[in-house]
Amino acid sequence: MQSLWWQLFDILGTVAFALSGALVAVLRRMDIFGIFVLAAATAVGGGIVRDLILGRIPPAFFQNSMYFWLIIATMGVTIFFLRYMDTHRRHRLMHASINLYLFCDAIGLGSFTVTGTLLGCYMFPHYWVLCISLGLITAVGGGIIRDVLAGRIPATLIQDVYATASFIGAVVLYVLYIPLGQAADVASIICFAVTVGVRLLAIRYHWNLPRVKRRKRGQRF
Amino acid sequence: MQSLWWQLFDILGTVAFALSGALVAVLRRMDIFGIFVLAAATAVGGGIVRDLILGRIPPAFFQNSMYFWLIIATMGVTIFFLRYMDTHRRHRLMHASINLYLFCDAIGLGSFTVTGTLLGCYMFPHYWVLCISLGLITAVGGGIIRDVLAGRIPATLIQDVYATASFIGAVVLYVLYIPLGQAADVASIICFAVTVGVRLLAIRYHWNLPRVKRRKRGQRF
Amino acid sequence: MQSLWWQLFDILGTVAFALSGALVAVLRRMDIFGIFVLAAATAVGGGIVRDLILGRIPPAFFQNSMYFWLIIATMGVTIFFLRYMDTHRRHRLMHASINLYLFCDAIGLGSFTVTGTLLGCYMFPHYWVLCISLGLITAVGGGIIRDVLAGRIPATLIQDVYATASFIGAVVLYVLYIPLGQAADVASIICFAVTVGVRLLAIRYHWNLPRVKRRKRGQRF
């Protein structure tokens, strides 16, 4: 789990999540402290909640300064990019980088789903509600905290197949690893591929989960 | 505490709380993942915070899949009800079921107040601030998380005698059980009756707690 | 750390923070339960999160009823003040007391920064990310929870040199205490003086942290 590849995925995910936090903070006209808090909350908030639920004291983020520097670096690049590019070049760059961002974000979603679910499977293999919840919380908890701090309803609760990709991946990992007894590595890779795949397909084809529709126009609930 | 009756009350409360979360999510136009998160947060959010404060790892919700299935079932019935009833029949049914809902919700409030306060009394009998806070947090914490996720100010902070009913019940249980040395069963039943009673009377007579009033019309604070 | 002076600072900070929570609650037209919850969340919310991260079960607030009574007393005085003063006298009193309030708040910020950072240094001296985060969380976490419950974007993320004062103080304490090996008392006093000093200067000279500015008028981000 701590192999070089997972560490790379972890770093990609942290950077992508920190970037999304920083962008939301800038849109809300926060100052640089606010930008840091939102970047950090998005990137490591889910992992901190996971560690509190598992009683891992202190949470991993606080033990390893690498995450701190990743967040600071992401924040610095984001601010530089937004501040010093002229409008025209910025728009072109943003269009070029939006796909890169969505790709990194999907990588992060997959990576965090694997680490969260796997940690649950190691510590409490018989509690499937726990293991799958941990995958979800690690992957989407940070984004929910980001949106609450930014004063908006968490995006993942309203639209998009985002948390659902993580949920499907977590179920796949749990089922392969515990009841079917596959090796952790195999189950992890399949979970990662499923999560990232579902997420990228959802972006490509604009998938949305169903909502409860009103049956008639103008009808009040 | 784990007798058949308490389990029944626990189930009734979980269902009523999950229903209130699902309804708020539908009103906010969330997708089905959002509906599940709000239903779960309302039903078990308070209990998870209680368990984190007491260091119970992992929190009870994650150990017992019953709560998960109760939330899924409640959600399914709610969505079916809102989606497939025609408007006229739905309105009649809603009027018929609103009283049932308020009754179940009051049962849940009472039941969660008892389990939260009692758990505190077992583990840390000398910390009355802790025991009473745990009763309150277990009973109303989920509703507060629901409202924060739905982007509104928590209803229980603004109006209604809701948290207050739980607070009175928790104080009654603590005083009867620890300083007065009554049996846990007796104290629990009285706490439950007081909480549910105060809540139902508050609904019936539209009680509200006082606010700080402005003395003159048009006067700015 | 638990000497008489620190206890005095702790009390001043708790009162100032409870006051700010109560005022926000009144502005949002909350009832007296809401006023209590916001006062308590502001005064002890940061400390509770700090204790959960450090695994201190149960958190300090729940063990010592002093904080509870301080919050109740602050709340009572605030409500009395807002309710029974006539407008003219109230406005004069408010102008007279706003400086006192800002001063107490700065004292609280400094005091909570010291206790949070120092606790981290005692328990996990080698994790600097943890120690500095704990100082920040203890000092500004309560205010962030207050603003989330009040349905607004946390003020400290948007404007003002507030969290930054706490951050600078926490870095100073950590550097003096762990790498430079100074006595805890000396490091604490310097941290306290730096935090309070930066905060008071920021109030006096209306300091704000930079934001990401748009380069042209009317340019959309």
Image (cartoon, coloured by chain):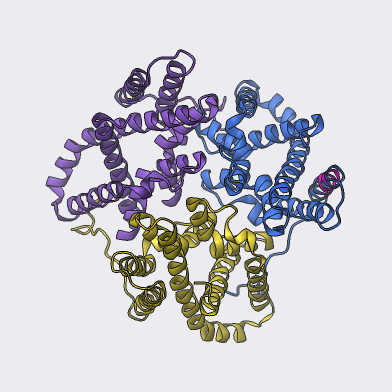
Chain colours: A purple, B blue, C yellow
**Which residue is located at x 65 percent, y 22 percent?**
B86
**Which residue is located at x 62 percent, y 35 percent?**
B60
**Which residue is located at x 28 percent, y 40 percent?**
A16
- Quadrant of the rendered image containing residue B178: bottom right
Residue A218: within the magenta? no
| Residue C49 screen position, x and y as percent | 51, 54
Q: Is residue B34 left or right of residue A83?
A: right
| Residue A177 screen position, x and y as percent | 43, 18
| Residue A15 screen position, x and y as percent | 27, 42
For the question of whether residue A211 can be seen, the reply is yes
Relative depth, front residue between B58 and B193: B58
Relative depth, front residue between C36 and A133: A133
Relative to A197, say whether C119 is above or below. below
- Quadrant of the rendered image containing residue C38: bottom right
**Which residue is located at x 43 percent, y 16 percent?**
A176
Residue stretch in magenta:
B188-194
- Quadrant of the rendered image containing residue A217: top right
- Magenta part, dominant SS: helix
